[in-house]
Each structure stands twice: as structure tokens, then as C-alpha cells.
Image (tube, coloured by chain):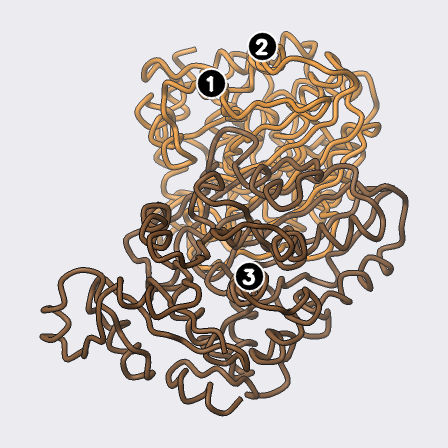
Chain colours: A orange, B brown
């Protein structure tokens, strides 16, 4: 049983903790939090041992019992998943190294701040075989691109990729962000950083990306163009993508207009927090003109990296190979299942849910 | 002096009327309106002879004097600019034909409903030489694409064009439209109709377009990729685009983040209704990777077709060639000028402004 500590219990941390608790081969050693807000309360109620990153006194005032400090958590963990805000993770590395504890970091960190970058579909085996102990799970957008470019490269060869990322302005809880009523080139310079980030896990892909930010919070939307190595039928591409366990081909008959409908669909299925761990590719958007493939995919920025974090732990300190890990992670979470509220991870009671497995 | 009737006095019609009034070789024969709303009142105050399309009685109740009906207006006009809602224009064609009056239509009409489609930069001379009497001025997005693709084709050759159009959900006054907080593939099928529409004025351009609609009202934003015929320097492309009188190269030093800033800039310059008749291309977004050119441009859906409507009139019934007409239109409107409130067209008093020219 791998004991995993989760440092940071915000948008990503709370989802990662619940996902770990649902795995048959992992348990949550505890979570660390800086501020005793509503999420700290929820962590305690979910049964996680809450560790105070700085001053413990405010936690007592908020009626959140504190199990120890960050040092205690790292010491108690076989591996730490750092889910702190962008830039903080890199500064924590020294602490993890002092405890000789391997760690995962999120996509907001610089690739250079870690030993390697990870995506389960792109380079699991490479990370598993290698010596990297401090590994970055690439961002939501990079994860979403890696999941489709890898099978397309394998099936047809990818000559060139061009993607316009229509980005949500902030997460639903980030009410301090914009824009309102505007469509911003972001960054205004081309290419955006997303293409180079894909190259941290898929170094040979020729990709140019453009970013645009809009007044929405639910998901990102990618307008994808891939010039393939050969002419191919759109139906063949649909089948190739449908074979991917972390790609959800949104069927035409579902009449899903956009991320709003996708989130409803996930909530109706009883998914924790209405999460969409999969790339959501509109089936009828898949089109081929000569060797140019086009499609739209929606990417849930809050959750698509969650199964990747689980797999990255096994690549780093476990014994499963890629296929084994992905199946295990998917089954425990319910990835690919929308048929009923069958998911083992609940928005509260993560620890209890873990006991069921 | 060309006598021009304007049928429809909404978002496009009111702007076209003011633009015509500002031309040295045109006068507004009158405007026709179906509903006596605030825009009808404004038309009367601006000095335009208001014609009632249907029942005249409600105009009297709204204190808007009626100069006649639509038949009277068409009869009094050398040419009519139809600015009615999409689909209505095609139904009006019979009336214009009955009066043997040539007419322009807007981009919302089907290309097949008219004799030809028009963009000043793409095919002015062809329309001027031809027999077409019922001509469609292509939509705002198609206008914006034609204005950049024509010079790029002339300078470097265009092998392939791919554009993601991030579309505003509605105009500022269209409060019955959405989306709110969503990013919709629109249409979800690829390619969108925009590419084929470009081919109505540039038949030889190989172009694939994807549409996305977002919660914004100010302008459209195009993420443009053009595979050029040869490798070329980004600065050369900047110069090529800057040479276009209807392309505004947004300078880096202006720190324009998006359409919100662009509209402020236009209002600060005293432009009527804060209009942006030009394509707004971010200078620092222009990038070249091999033969792949990329840039962002913002397109003001309410006004970029206005100078094109003026030119189309001359192509149809005037004696100016393309270069002459464009210069005349630009000068009268102030296209390309942002230095001060020098524009001759005011948001009210169009007829009076006309007298100044």
C-alpha cells in the first residue's frame, strides 16, 4: 500500500486526494493546507489527516483538528503530490529532497524545475524506467493534447499540429478573474507556451499553438488541426480516438452544445464534483480535408490531470506498467463511464469510499 | 449625385445611411423601417426621410413623420441598400426588380439569392465590369478574411488557410442572445460556412474554417493560420498588411489587450458609435514558422462592412474604379485615422454632416 501525501488542498489537491483514496493500492497519508477555509473543513470531514503548512492556530479557531505540520506529512509519505499554486511547488522541492521523498508537481511549475514531465499516454514507460524522482504532471491543456496526438501519431503519423486554445478565464471558484465580455489574445504573441509544453512529453511533435481567453469558467475548448502523414477517412479517425480510454467521443445524438451540457451530463451521471476526466471530442466535428484533420475537444481544467497524477505515482514508485496502471486508475474512478452514479469517489467521504475498494 | 435608399435601419442600416451621407457623390434618398422604435426616432432626428415598410399609423403615434412607403423609397432611389434581417433581403428582391432598381444585400443572405458577392479588396473590378444588378456584400467575417487573404495571395501566394473564428454571441444591443459562461463549437461540424463564403469572392483560396461562439458582444476574434507559398519574414508580412488601408496594425506600444481596448480607442478618437471599420491585426501576434503564418485579428461585426457597402454602390452604378472608390470612401469616413475626433460622420446628424462634405 503506497502512502501518499497531498500538499495543497485546492482545486486539484482535493480531487487528487479523493482519487488516491479510491485506488486499491494507495492510501492518503494526509493532506497539507495553508489556510483553514471551507476546503480545510471539507478535508477533515472527508476523513483526511489535515496538516498545517504554516500557523496551526487558525485551524483550531476554524474547528479543524491538525494532525501535524508539513514536515510530518512528508515524513509519513512514500511519495508526495504537490498541488500548491504555480511556482510554490518548485520552492517545496528542497523540503521533499531533505526527506528523500519523491514528489509529483503540477503543470503550473516550470518544466526545468523538475527532473521530467509526465503524461500517462505519452511517456509513462520512460518515466517508470528512468531515474526521475521529481516529476511534473503536465497541465490540463497539455494533457488533453498529448492524449490525442499520441494515438494519431501511432496510427497515421503527425506532420504538423496547429491548435487554437479557447481558454476559460478562471475556474468556477475564481471569482477574482476575468475577462468579462471580451475575447483576449492570450498570449498575444504566437506561438503560445502550450506547444513547447507538449514537447516536454512528446519531443518530436511539430506543434504551433495560439491562446485566446474568454468569459467562461466551465472548460477549455480546443480547435484542433493536425496535418496527418497520410490521407485518412474521418470515420477511421473517430475509431482511433474512440479506442482511447481517456477520450470521450461526444455522440451526435446526445445534442451536447458545449461545456455547459457536458457538465450537466457528468453531474447527472453522479460524477464527483461533476468532473470530466476525459477529453471530450465532438464526434460530428471530426473532419478531414486532404491530410488535414480537424476536430473540437473540451478539456475540464479542474480534473483531466487527476487520473494522470494517480498514474504518475505508479510510474515513480509503483510496479505497474502503463496499461495496468491506466486500467486500475480508470476502474477505481469510473473514467469512461457515464451510465449511472457508479463512481467510487464521492465529493465528501473520500476516505470512507476508499475502504469500499 | 447618386440617390441611395436604405431599407432597414438597424445595426447595419443606420451605419450605412450615415456613411452614404458623408460621401461627396451620394445622398440618402430616405430610409425604410418596419417598427417605430428608438432607431426610427433617431433616423428622423438625423434628417433622413423615414418610410414605413408596413403600417404607418404606429409611426405617427411615436411622433415619427412618415415620408412614404417602401415603394415610394425604391422609386426615388437609383440604388437600394437592403439592410433588413437575414433572409428578408432575398424576399425583397422582387420589389426592387419591379422598379428596375439595382440593389445591395447583406452577408446574411444566401449567396445564391443574388447575382454576385462583393468585397472591395477581392473583386471590385469584376463586379464593376459585370452585369450583376443584385449584389451581396459579404458578411463581417468574410470581409475581414478577404481583406488579408487578397494581399497575402498577391505578395506570397496562399497555399492553404485555416482559421478559428471566435465569434461574439450577439451585438451589444442583442440582449436576447447567448451564450453565458460557455464556449460553444458553432457550428459543431467542421468546416464552418465561413470558408465557402470566402470562396464566393475569392474562389481560388483553399480555406478551412472552424467557428466557436463565446459570451462577448464587442467584436469577433480570428485566430488565423496561412500556409504561404514561400518562406517569408514576419516583418515583411507586417509591412504587407500595414500597406492595406483597411487593416489597422495594432501597435505593441498601445498595449491593447483585446476588443474592449479597441472599442475604447475608437471612442476616444471620436469615431461614430465607436466603430472600427478596419481589420484590427495585433502587430506582435504576426509570427512565421517555416511557411506557416499566424496572427490574431479582431473584426467589428457592426461596422467593417460599412465602407464595403459604399464601394459596392460605386461598383454597381458609379464610375469610379476600385482604388478611386476606396480612397473616396476612406477619406469621407476617416478609415485608418485614429488621431482625433475628425470623422465626418456623427452618430446623429448624418444628413447635416453630409452637407459639410
**Figure label count:** 3
Query: Mark 2–mark 3 contact, CB under 8 Å?
Result: no
- Front disc: 2 or 3: 3
Residue of label 3: B312
Asked if residue A320 shows in the view, the reply is yes
Residue B8 picture location, percent across and down: 33, 62
Badge 1 crowding class, 10 Å Cα cut-off, few under 14, some 14 to 19, many 20 or more, is many
Query: Under tag 1, what secondary structure?
Result: helix
Residue drawn where x is 47% and y is 38% of the image: B112
Q: CA distance from mark 2 to mark 3?
A: 48 Å
- In which quadrant will I find the C terminus of chain A? top left
> Which residue was labeled with disc 2?
A239
| Horizontal arrangement in the rendering, residue B61 relative to residue A30 (left or right) | left
Asked if marks 1 and 3 fall on the same chain, the answer is no
Residue at left offset 66%, top offset 66%: B246
The image quadrant that residue A124 belongs to is top right
Q: Is residue B73 left or right of residue B55?
A: right
Q: Are marks 1 and 2 in contact (CB under 8 Å)?
A: no
Q: Position of residue B329 (x, y in %)?
A: 59, 74
- Residue B51 lies left or right of residue B23; in this view the side is left
Q: Chain of mark 1?
A: A
Q: Chain of mark 2?
A: A
Chain name for mark 3: B
Label 1 sits on residue = A333
Cα separation between marks 1 and 3: 61 Å
In the rendered image, residue B145, in percent from the top left (x then y), is placed at: 63, 51
Q: Nearer the viewer, residue B211 or A258?
A: B211
Nearer to us of marks 1 and 3 is 3
Q: Nearer the viewer, mark 1 or mark 2?
A: 2
Above or below, B109 relative to B103: above
User: Relative to residue A195, is residue A131 depicted above or below?
Assistant: above
Amino acid at each position: 500500500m503506497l502512502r501518499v501525501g497531498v500538499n495543497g488542498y485546492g482545486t486539484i489537491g482535493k480531487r487528487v486526494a479523493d482519487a488516491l483514496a479510491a485506488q486499491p493500492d494507495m492510501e492518503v497519508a494526509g493532506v497539507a493546507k495553508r489556510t483553514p477555509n471551507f476546503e480545510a473543513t471539507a478535508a477533515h470531514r472527508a476523513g483526511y489527516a489535515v496538516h498545517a503548512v504554516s500557523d496551526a492556530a487558525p485551524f483550531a479557531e476554524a474547528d479543524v483538528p491538525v494532525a501535524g505540520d508539513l514536515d510530518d506529512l512528508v515524513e509519513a509519505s512514500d511519495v508526495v503530490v504537490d498541488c500548491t499554486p504555480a511556482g510554490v511547488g518548485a520552492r517545496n522541492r528542497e523540503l521533499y529532497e531533505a526527506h528523500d521523498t519523491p514528489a509529483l508537481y503540477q503543470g503550473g511549475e516550470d518544466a526545468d524545475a523538475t527532473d521530467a514531465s509526465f503524461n500517462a499516454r505519452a511517456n509513462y514507460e520512460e518515466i517508470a524506467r528512468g531515474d526521475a524522482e521529481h516529476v511534473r504532471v503536465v497541465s490540463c491543456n497539455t494533457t488533453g493534447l498529448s492524449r490525442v496526438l499520441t494515438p494519431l501519431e501511432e496510427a497515421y503519423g503527425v506532420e504538423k499540429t496547429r491548435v487554437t486554445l479557447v481558454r476559460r478565464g478562471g475556474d468556477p471558484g475564481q471569482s477574482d478573474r476575468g475577462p468579462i465580455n471580451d475575447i483576449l489574445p492570450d498570449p498575444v504573441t504566437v506561438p503560445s507556451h502550450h506547444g513547447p509544453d507538449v514537447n516536454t512529453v512528446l519531443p518530436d511533435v511539430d506543434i504551433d499553438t495560439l491562446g485566446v481567453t474568454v468569459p467562461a469558467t466551465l472548460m477549455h475548448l480546443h480547435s484542433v488541426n493536425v496535418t496527418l502523414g497520410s490521407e485518412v477517412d474521418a470515420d477511421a479517425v473517430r475509431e482511433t480516438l474512440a479506442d482511447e480510454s481517456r477520450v470521450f467521443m461526444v455522440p451526435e445524438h446526445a445534442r451536447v452544445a458545449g461545456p455547459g451540457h457536458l457538465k450537466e451530463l457528468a453531474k447527472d451521471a453522479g460524477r464527483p464534483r461533476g468532473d470530466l476526466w476525459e477529453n471530450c471530442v465532438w464526434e460530428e466535428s471530426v473532419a478531414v480535408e486532404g491530410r488535414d484533420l480537424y476536430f473540437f475537444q473540451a478539456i475540464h481544467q479542474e480534473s483531466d490531470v487527476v487520473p494522470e497524477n494517480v498514474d504518475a505515482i505508479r510510474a515513480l514508485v509503483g510496479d505497474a506498467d502503463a496499461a495496468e496502471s491506466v486500467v486500475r486508475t480508470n476502474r477505481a474512478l469510473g473514467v469512461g463511464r457515464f451510465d449511472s452514479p457508479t463512481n467510487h469517489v464521492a465529493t465528501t467521504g473520500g476516505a470512507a469510499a476508499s475502504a469500499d475498494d
